[in-house]
Image (cartoon, rainbow, N blue to C red):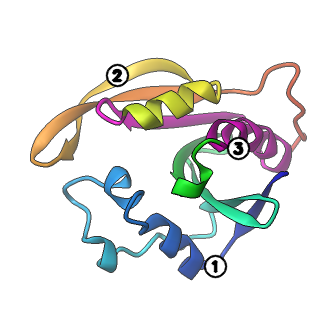
Amino acid sequence: MIRFERTSDMELVQSVMRHPKIYPHLTDDGCPPAEEFQPMDHPAIWYVLVFDADELLGLWMFVPENAVCWCVHTCLLPVAWGRAREAAVQMAVWIWTNTPCRRLVTMVPVRNRLALKLAEAAGMQRYGLNKNSFLKHGKLQDQILLGLSPTEETPCQQHR
């Protein structure tokens, strides 16, 4: 059973984000080496852990751009692979139900095909392209802009 939990345990967040199978895909050429990386600790940022029963699958980081539009960053551990799509779909419902967020957006570098497939499998739709906006291994890459909003069938809490 997939479940979600907001956390302020920055050591746990750091351990997930620094994972050698995750960190290289989260970062660009301007980021420090994994051993020096410190996740941002701010009350506006939501770090949401995802579990299958008691097994930690990873986390999502949500950064509000405004009151209702939040940018999402996915950090799923290798143990989550095979369960990632289901977790991502359920995560969106959890966000609509537990926060004032009504629009999720993300940017995926064009070469990160796995992240793009997961975002689209979770229901995110392409809405644009941010040209030459990501520097990796000394080369500029475009980023695909994706977004997701709740549907009429998706339960939402009304937040003020």
In the rendered image, residue 120, in percent from the top left (x then y), is placed at: 55, 25
User: Marks 3 and 2: which is nearer the front?
Assistant: 3
Q: Nearer the viewer, mark 1 or mark 2?
A: 1
Kindly state the secondary structure of the residue where label 1 is placed: loop
- Does residue 19 sit above or below 123 in this rendering? below
Give the image location of residue 107, x and y in percent: 42, 36
Residue type at numbered disc 1: Asp
In the image, is residue 117 above or below residue 4?
above
Can you identify the residue that label 3 sits on?
87
| Label 3 to label 2: alpha-carbon separation | 26 Å
The residue shown at (89%, 40%) is: 158
Mark 2 highlights which residue? Answer: 129
Lower position in the chain sequence, tag 1 or tag 3: 1
Residue 32 location, x and y as percent?
25, 70
Q: Dot 2: few (<14), some (14–19), or many (≥20) neighbours within 10 Å?
A: some
Q: How many marks?
A: 3
Residue 33 in sight: yes
Residue at image position (61%, 58%) is: 59
Query: Which segment did they paint magenta?
Result: 83-112
Q: What label does residue 9 carry, if any? A: 1
For residue 130, side relative to residue 84 (left or right): left
Mark 1 or mark 3, which is nearer to you? 3
What's the residue at 55%, 45% (across, down)?
72
